[in-house]
Image (cartoon, rainbow, N blue to C red):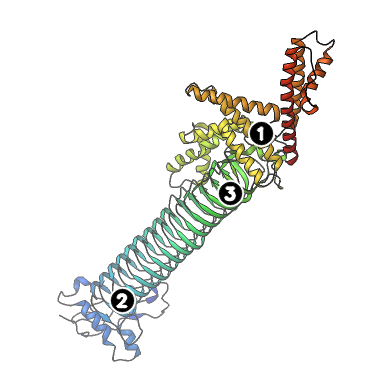
Amino acid sequence: MVWSGAGDGQCRFQCEPAAQHESIADSETWRCPHGAMADADHCPFHRPPAETPEDVDVSAAFLDAVESGADGDRTAHRRSKQFLGADIATLDLSMAVVDATDNYPIDLRGASIDRLDGTDSEVGQRLDLRGATVGELRLDGAYHELDARGATVESGAFAGVRVDGVDCRDATFETVDFDRASVGEAAFDDATVGDGSFHHTEFGMADFDDATFETGDFYHASFDEGDFRGASFGTARFYGTTFGGGYFNETSYEEAVFERIEAERFYLPDATLAGGTFADAAVSMKLVLKNSTFVGTDFTGLDAERVDLTGSTLVRPTVDDATVADLQLDGATLASPRLTDCTVDRVTAADVRCLGVVTVEDCTVDTVDLSPTAAGPDGVALVSLSGSAVGGGTLGQPADGTVVYDLEQTTLGTVKFTGGGSGGPLDRLAFHRTRFDGFDVRDDDDVDLEAADYRLHELADGLADPLRTTLAYPHALETMVGAAGDDETAAALLERAATRAADQSLPDDARERSDRLAEATEGTIPAADGEVTYLRAKNGANDIADNTAASAFFVSQLAYRRRTHAGRVVDGSAPLRGRVRSLGRWGLNAFLFLTTGYGERPSYTLGASVALVVGYAALYLALAPRLFADVEQYLQLSLGSFIAFFLGGVGAVDDATVNVIAQSEAFLGAFFIALYVFALTRSVSR
C-alpha cells in the first residue's frame, strides 16, 4: 500500500531542532508537516517501524512527500522536505532522482534509520543528516551536498559517490568507505572513524582536523589541500597519495605509511612516528618535519626540494638513495641516523646533538655546515663520511665532547674543520685512503698540519674506549627500538641504548671499523693503507700548489711503500721470486730515503756524503796503515777522491789497491753531488 500523505489528521510528532546538533540554531519547536496515517497519531516517518503496516512502502511515501510541496509556496517547498526525528527501518532511495526547483534541503536531522540506500541515486538538494543515527548508509550516486555533522553511522558506504560537499564534523563512523569517490569539499573535523577506506578518492579541499581514526587508509587518494592537523591515527596509510598541500601538524600515529606520496607541500611538524615510512616520497617544494620525533622511520628513495627537520629527534632512521636539495637539521638530535647513496645539495646542521654513529656513506653532498653542540654516549660521537664526496662547507666540534670524523675513502673538497680546542681538530679526523679534491690545510680553519708534522692518520690516544661504546650504540639503539613499549619516549630509548652500548660486545659489522680506529689511536696504519692515504694527500696538495705539504706527504707515501715491500719479503706464503723482487725494491727504497730523503731532503744527501768520505778514509787507513803519517791525510785523500771528477781526476797514490778504491769513490762522489743538486733544486722549487 502506498501512503497517500493524508489521514485523519496531522502527525503529532514534534521536537526541538537545536537538540539534534549544536550547529542548529532553530529556537522554535518543530512540528511534523506530514499527515498522520489512518487510525494513527503519526505519519509513517515518525510511527515506530514495528507499528507500521507491512504493506506501507515508506520509501515511496518519502519520495512522494518530498515532491508534495512542488506546487505550493516557499514554505510548502521547505516543509515538505522536513523529516526531523524520523524513525525509519529502511529508506530505499536507490535509482531515485530528486532534483526540485528549490534549494531547500532534504532534512533528516536527528533521524534514526536502520538502513538508508541511495544506490545510483541523484539528489540535487543538500541531504541533511545532522545528529542522525544510521545503521547502514549507502550513497554512491551523484549528490549536491551531504551534511552529517554529529551523525552516528555504523556502516557508511560511499564508494564511487560524486558529491560537491561532505560535512561530517563530529560524526562517528564504525566503518566508512569512500573508495573511488569524488568529493569537492570535505570536512571531517573532530570525526571519529573506526575503519576508514578512501582508496583512489579524489578530494578538493578536505579537512580532518582533530579527527580520530583506528584505521585511515587513503591509498592513492588525491587532495588539492588535505588538512589533518591534530588528527590521531592508530594506523594511517597514505600509500601513493597525492597532495597539492598536506598538513599533518601535531598528529600522532601507532603506524604510519606515507610511502610514494607526491606533494607540492607537505607539513608534519610537532608529530611522533614510531616506525613509519616515507619511502619513495616525492615533494616538489618543501617537506616540513620540524620539532617531530622519528623512531626507526624509513626515508628510502625520498625526493624533495627542501626537507626541514629543525629541532627534530631522529632515532635510527634509514635514508637510502634519497635526493634532497636543501636539508635543514638545525637543533636536531641525530641518534645514529643512516644516510647511504644519497645526493644532497646543501646540509645545514647548526647546534645539533650527535649520538652514536651518524652515518653519511657513499653520498654526494655539495655543501655541509655541521656544528655539534653535544656528543654521546660517553661524550664521543662518530660521523662516518666513508665513501662520500663532500664539496665544501664546515665540520665542527662541540664545546663539550668530541666528534670523530671517519674519512675512509671520502672525497674532500673545500671543507674546513673547526674547533677542537688549542690543539685543533686534526687528532679527531680519521683519514684513511681519503681523496682530496680542493681540500686546503692552508686556509683559515683550525687544522695545523705543520704542528702535527703532516701526520694524517693519527687519532687522539684517549679515544679508543669511548669509540668502542660509540660503535656499539647503533646496534643497542636498534634493539631498544624493537623492544620499545607503546608509551616509551624517545628520551628513554636513548638513555637505555647508551647503558646497553657500554655493556655489550661489538656487533660483527662494527668490528672492522673499531679495529681500524683503534690502530689510529695508537698512531699506526697498515702499510698499504698508509701508502694510498699519503699518495692521495700528496696528489691533492699538488693540485692546489701546496708544495710544502706535498713534499711531506710524498716522503710518508714512500716510507709506507717501503714497509709494504718489507711485509712481502717476510710473507712466507708468497712465491720466492716475488719475495726476492720485493727485497730489491725495499733496498732501493731504503737507499733513496737514506741518501736523499726521497729527493725531498738535500740535507740527507749532505749527511750521506760526509758518511761516505769518512767511511772511505777509514777503509784507506785499514788497507794501507803506513801510507800516511796521520789520520787527517787519509781524510784529505778521501775528500779529494770524492770530488775528483770535478777536479780532473784522482791524484796518484803509491798503493795500487788504494788507488783503485779511490777511483770508485770518485765515481760515487760525482753521483752524490748530482743527487744533492737534484734534491736541492727540488726542495727550492717546493
Identify the residue shown where x is 44% and y is 60%: 231
* Residue 515 vertical position relative to residue 27 in the rendered view, above or below: above
Q: CA distance from mark 2 to mark 1?
A: 83 Å
Residue 32 picture location, percent across and down: 30, 81
Residue 276 seen by the camera: yes
Res 408 → quadrant: top right
Identify the residue position indicated by label 3 in the image: 390
Quadrant that contains the N terminus: bottom left
Q: Is residue 181 above or below residue 282?
A: below
Query: In the image, what residue type sits under mark 3?
Result: Val
Q: Is residue 15 above or below residue 651?
A: below
Residue hosting label 2? 142
Kind of residue at badge 2: Ala
Neighbours of disc 3 within 10 Å: few (<14), some (14-19), many (20+): many
Q: Nearer the viewer, residue 28 or 685?
A: 685
Q: Which residue is mark 1?
A: 555
- Classify residue 40 as left or right of residue 662: left
* Mark 2, secondary structure of its residue: strand
